[in-house]
Image (spheres, grey):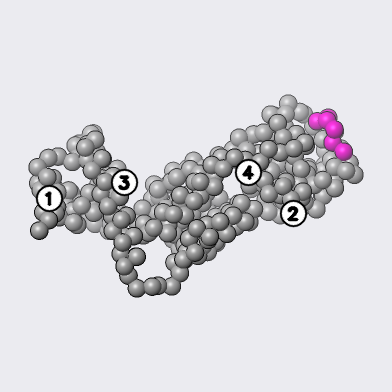
Amino acid sequence: MRRLPPLHALQVFEVAARAGSYAQAGLELGLTHGAVSRQIGALEGWLGQRLFVRVGRRMVATPAARAFAEEISLSFDRLTAAAEACGRPQAPRVLKVSAPSTFAMRWLIPRLDGFHRARPGTEVAVATTTTLQDALRGGFDLAIRRGPEPWPQFRAVPFLAEADTLVASPALLRDKPLPALGDLAGHVLLATETRPGDWSDWLARADVTLPGGTRRRVFDHFFVTLQALEDGCGLGIGPFPVLDRAVEAGRLVAPFPEIRVSRPGYFVLTPFDADKSPALTAFVEWLVAEGSRPGLTIPR
């Protein structure tokens, strides 16, 4: 007979150590602060040593407890995987992902075949949102947002850096070349209500001041602006690597690629109370791997 510690106490301890507080562990597990404290106390009694110490008003895991929690987490992951492998065949697992519209259309969805080849038993259902300020309500397994933001109910993992630069359609620049920054004033500038600082930040980086009569058109969402850009309606500021494939396909060009403005990158957000299944873990790891691939070197 194995002499195992109390398994429920182990689960509570692992969550408390990962979440960083008894209160957050209680929210994730649906327990009161007192119930979390009692389970931690039971495990400390079984082990014969303290796992948390008080720092100010918070209970903080000791270094030994953090290492113990990492081992427990790996063991729980193995138990989950073993149970799935031993269980009866089930319908394909569906992961529900909430993502910004342009990001979903231009970066995420074109890459999903790679994930499906690696995880043929997992389907990814993408629901788009038209503003990054949309409330992070339920109905998804994980969300993708630009950050950094305070996301207290979510585990946030950064996976993709972003930078803006000037973009236009090749046809537009053939008809109306843009050999120098001074020629910007002769073009129509396309902007987006949800990205109000794009042009001002890029012009400041380029050290260019445009005359007051420069023509501008403003659209409500960036995916509308992007369509107008590809149709040759004017110049715009676009995010990379989200638009890498549009440049590769010849739908857009970046005439001054060396002038770039760094933007907040993308994070994958997993609710603390989510089912930490192998499929969800694999998708987060896939996003991180895709985001670390070398970016496109944009030609002039």
**Mark in front: 4 vs 3:** 4
C-alpha distance separating marks 2 and 3: 42 Å
At x 62%, y 56%, the residue is 110
Disc 3 target residue: 19
Provide the secondary structure element on which disc 3 rests: helix
| Left or right: 91, with 240 as reference point | left
- Residue picked out by circle 4: 241
Tell which residue pokes out farthest to the right in this image. Answer: 175
Residue drawn where x is 80% and y is 30% of the image: 181
- Mark 4 vs mark 2, CA separation in Å: 17 Å
Q: Residue at x 82, y 43 (%)?
A: 188
The label on residue 227 is: 2
Judging by the rendered image, the residue that carries numbered circle 1 is: 42
Give percent across and percent down for residue 146.
54, 45
Q: Which residues fall within the magenta stretch?
A: 177-182
Earlier along the polypeptide chain: callout 2 or callout 1?
1
- 300 above or below 219? above
The disc, 4 or 3, on the residue closer to the chain's N-terminal end is: 3
The residue lying toward the viewer, choosing from 298 and 12, is 298
